Image (cartoon, grey):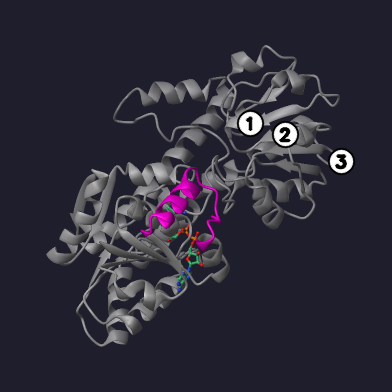
Amino acid sequence: MNVCVIGTGYVGLVSGVCFSDIGNRVTCVDLDENKINNLNNGIVPIYEPGLKELVIKNTNEERLFFTTDLKAGMDDADIIIIAVGTPEKESGEADLRFVEAVAKSIGENLSDYKVIVTKSTVPVGTNRRVKSIISEYCGHEDFDVASNPEFLREGSAIYDTMNMERAIIGVESQKAGDLLTKLHEPFDTTVMVTDIETAEMIKYASNAFLATKISFINEIANICEKLNANVMDVAKGMGLDDRIGEKFLSAGIGYGGSCFPKDTKALIQISGEVEHDFSLLKSVIEVNNKQQQRLIEKALNRFDRLEGKNVALLGLAFKPNTDDMREAASIVISEELVKHGANIKGFDPIAKDTAKKVLPSEVMIAESIDEAIQDADIIMILTDWQEIKDLDLNKVAALPGKPVIFDGRNCFSLDYVGQFDLEYHSIGRPSLVE
Ligand SMILES: NC(=O)c1ccc[n+]([C@@H]2O[C@H](COP(=O)([O-])OP(=O)(O)OC[C@H]3O[C@@H](n4cnc5c(N)ncnc54)[C@H](O)[C@@H]3O)[C@@H](O)[C@H]2O)c1
């Protein structure tokens, strides 16, 4: 099949690459000339395990192409996938500017039948709007629209796409449903065909539910701290019940990233528009906002003042295996530390360059963990990268400043930390004080 993917970001690039790898001819289109030139030279703009290799392989085998020319990209396509960003407006609502602009451009260039699929996360009703924009600009209705929400996780996006647990396809015609089912056949996955509104809602409901699990376990963690219980064991015990499941029950400093924060707020807006007050989800967001401040609270309880303290922030990306820092806890935490007058050195194995752009200018970015912690009074662990989980605590215990560790991701077992002469505070577990 010939596929055109519009928007070559985390979702568009990964989807385009994977669709080409299973044998389709894929053209990825983006407005960003620099990005497209780089991709044409094998330079991948984002860090995602396995992505670069697949870009090079499929480009060399002439199944994968990159262009800024939308018309050229869509002319031979059977399927056009919209994968542009849907950021959050100030009001929390999803900003559909990019989706609508793409719909207009598709309409201006659409001559024969194609299925136009929205992969971007969009509020219920958006695909109908996309349909009306396209037909307004092309002057006919010889096309179908479909919703195919994306569930990949940054950091394991290639794996998640190649091994997708389900493909949700929202359509209003059998022809579009059959074509999209065929596109997904090589993934050997469960294909669920629904109406368009249901597919759009499945995406928001899924993300809202996962965010709810995280805020739930974080609230349990905060109670565990007061009762001397261990939240990791509580979560393990809960997860043994397969009605609950063990996943997404890791207590920490809350969720971030490009999806959960904006999608939960957008769902509250969507509910508000139909006069439903989604109070549960409002609490989930409130809990998460507070949770991102937990390490600061703990440090203030321990030290009273953070002015002049040397703080090492380990892990700056919103989660491991990505360089994405959208809504990362490191942003809120470093802004707060700057307000308190702390001296901050941050380290991340991959997101250093992004960090230099998005963190306050007062944050120094270290080249290694050793450089970040060498004169630290406080170490805050914000992302559970493997390199950080492998940190040699012997080395930390031997540092002149005897830094106190505040672990926001529960990277170490208490038994392990207990072997060292260290003060250690984590989330939802008793503190270890020398
Ligand atoms: N990132 C994720 O983990 C993830 C997971 C599931 C769903 N989603 C959803 O997928 C969508 C895309 O997210 P992302 O993280 O890939 O976004 P992104 O910001 O990384 O990429 C969007 C790309 O679209 C391009 N673009 C914008 N307008 C364009 C136009 N008119 N023509 C061509 N290209 C254009 C931009 O230049 C950019 O490269 C969002 O709706 C998001 O909510 C994201």
Residue occupying the far bottom of the picture: 139
Residue type for callout 3: Gly
User: In the rendered image, which residue does mark 3 sit on?
Assistant: 308
What is the spatial separation of the Cα atoms under label 3 and label 1, in whole angstroms? Answer: 25 Å
User: In the rendered image, which residue does mark 1 sit on?
Assistant: 388
Front-most of residues 8 and 329? 8
What is the spatial separation of the Cα atoms under label 1 and label 2, in whole angstroms? Answer: 8 Å
Q: Do the residues labelled 2 and 3 touch (CB within 8 Å)?
A: no
- N-terminal label among 3 and 1: 3
Quadrant of the rendered structure where residue 308 is?
top right
Residue type for callout 1: Ile
Tell me: residue 148, above or below residue 241: below
Q: In the drawing, does residue 213 fall left or right of residue 136?
A: right
The span shown in magenta is: 40-63
Q: Which type of secondary structure does the marked residue at label 1 adopt?
A: helix
Residue 390 counted in the magenta span: no
Q: Which residue is depicted at the point 29% across and 80% down? A: 110
Q: Are marks 1 and 2 in contact (CB under 8 Å)?
A: yes
Tell me: residue 274, above or below residue 426: below
Front-most of residues 163 and 199? 163
Q: Which type of secondary structure does the marked residue at label 2 adopt?
A: helix
Residue occupying the far top of the picture: 419
Mark 1 Cβ inside 8 Å of ligand 1 = no
Quadrant of the rendered structure where residue 310 is?
top right
What is the spatial separation of the Cα atoms under label 2 and label 3, in whole angstroms? Answer: 20 Å
